[in-house]
Amino acid sequence: MKTTINCTKHLDSEHTSVWETTRELIERKHEHLRHLHPDLNKAELHLRAFSRQSEVHLLVHDSRHRLIEAHASASNLDKSISLAFKRAEVQLAKPKHLQNR
């Protein structure tokens, strides 16, 4: 089953101008996560980027009713996105009772 990622973004003009590249990165990271964990059925990504500060909040739901939350912030939006997906990947690899810790 192909899942999509819902994305909410609050970006300044600098980040808006490179949105296509950022969107492609998000799609690649989401596809990689789905490849590792095929039971994912929903993902939400909330982005905020202004000047040299970015924040990313990723929520991932799977078919076993788990909810994984991953947060990241960095001076670079792409780095924040990569960190959030990596943190979600690590959480999904843990047994359920250790997730989000």
Image: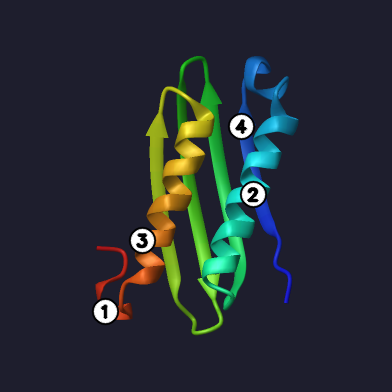
Q: Which residue is mark 3?
A: 90
Q: At which x and y percent is residue 96? A: 33, 79
Q: At which x and y percent is residue 45? A: 57, 49
Q: Which residue is mark 1?
A: 97
> What's the distance in space between the residues labelled 1 and 4, CA to CA?
33 Å
Point out the tag, 2 or 3, that comes first from the N-terminus: 2
Q: Residues within 10 Å of mark 4 (few under 14, many from 20)?
A: some
State the colouring used for the structure image: rainbow
Give the amino acid at mark 3.
Val
Q: Which residue is mark 2?
A: 28
Q: Residue at x 31, y 72 (%)?
A: 94
Point out the tag, 2 or 4, that comes first from the N-terminus: 4
Give the amino acid at mark 1.
His
Query: Considering only vertical position in the picture, is 6 above or below 22?
Result: below
**Viewer-nearest of discs 3 and 1:** 3
Q: Which residue is mark 4?
A: 10
**Viewer-nearest of discs 2 and 1:** 2
Query: Considering only vertical position in the picture, is 76 above or below 32?
Result: above
Q: Residue at x 69, y 39 (%)?
A: 23
> What's the distance in space between the residues labelled 2 and 4, CA to CA?
21 Å
Q: Residue at x 45, y 76 (%)?
A: 66
Q: At which x and y percent is residue 70? A: 41, 53
